Image (tube, grey):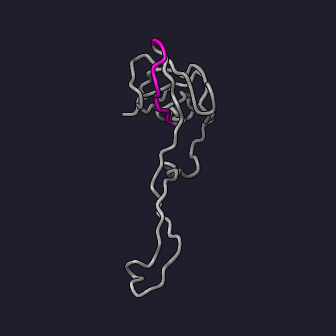
Amino acid sequence: MQEIGRIAEILSDRLALAELRESATPNTIVTVFSRSAPEPTLAQKYQLEHIDIPKGELRILARQKGNLYLLESFRETIERTEVIRPMENLLSGIMGMEVRKQQAFGPASASLSAPTMPIKFRSSVEVGDLIALNV
């Protein structure tokens, strides 16, 4: 990942202040990640200097001053259809149910199996974590 800045401060359970080395526009989604030294076996096997571990995504809300930006955590929503009750009539094959559509949080982007080469890192976003643009 190409680092463009760092988390400077955590302001609340959903807001953070970031220092970015390049200008960014509101509503841009950035990835927060940590850079960890790999286990010696992994480093030697793949000639790795570090591993960039994504922690999540934040949305840029606004530029504050200079290179400081306010970021927020978010969850995308999806439309979910729910059958409320079946209706019994002659046209039940076509119009046989009452349906309600609502917005709900979407699923996780991936489900991974058990680690083959586990590494230790904190999954929560912390001061000093790195930031990359989503491309």
Residue 20 position, x and y percent, is 46, 18
Residue 121 in view, yes or no: no
Residue 70: percent from left, percent from top: 51, 24
Residue sitting nearer the eye, 104 or 39: 104
Main structural element of the magenta stretch: helix, strand or loop?
strand
Residue at 52 percent across and 34 percent down: it is 53
Residue displayed at 40% across by 88% down: 90
Seen as rendered, the residue at the extreme top is: 66
Name the quadrant containing residue 17.
top right
Q: Which residue corresponds to the image point at 61% horizontal and 27% vertical from the top-left?
A: 126
Query: Residue 123 is drawn in which quadrant?
Result: top right
Residue situated furthest bottom in the rendering? 90
Asked if residue 66 is positioned above or below residue 18 in the image, the reply reads above
The N terminus: image quadrant: top left
Answer above or below: position of 124 versus 7.
below
> Percent from the top left, x then y, of residue 102?
49, 57
Position of 9 relative to 125 (above/below): above
Q: Position of residue 114 (x, y in %)?
A: 58, 50
Along the line of sight, which residue is nearer the eye, 135 or 47?
135
Asked if residue 60 is among those painted magenta in the image, a careful observer would answer yes
Residue 86 to residue 10: above or below: below
Part of the protein shown in magenta: 57-66
Q: Is residue 45 visible?
A: yes
The residue at 49%/17% (across/down) is 64
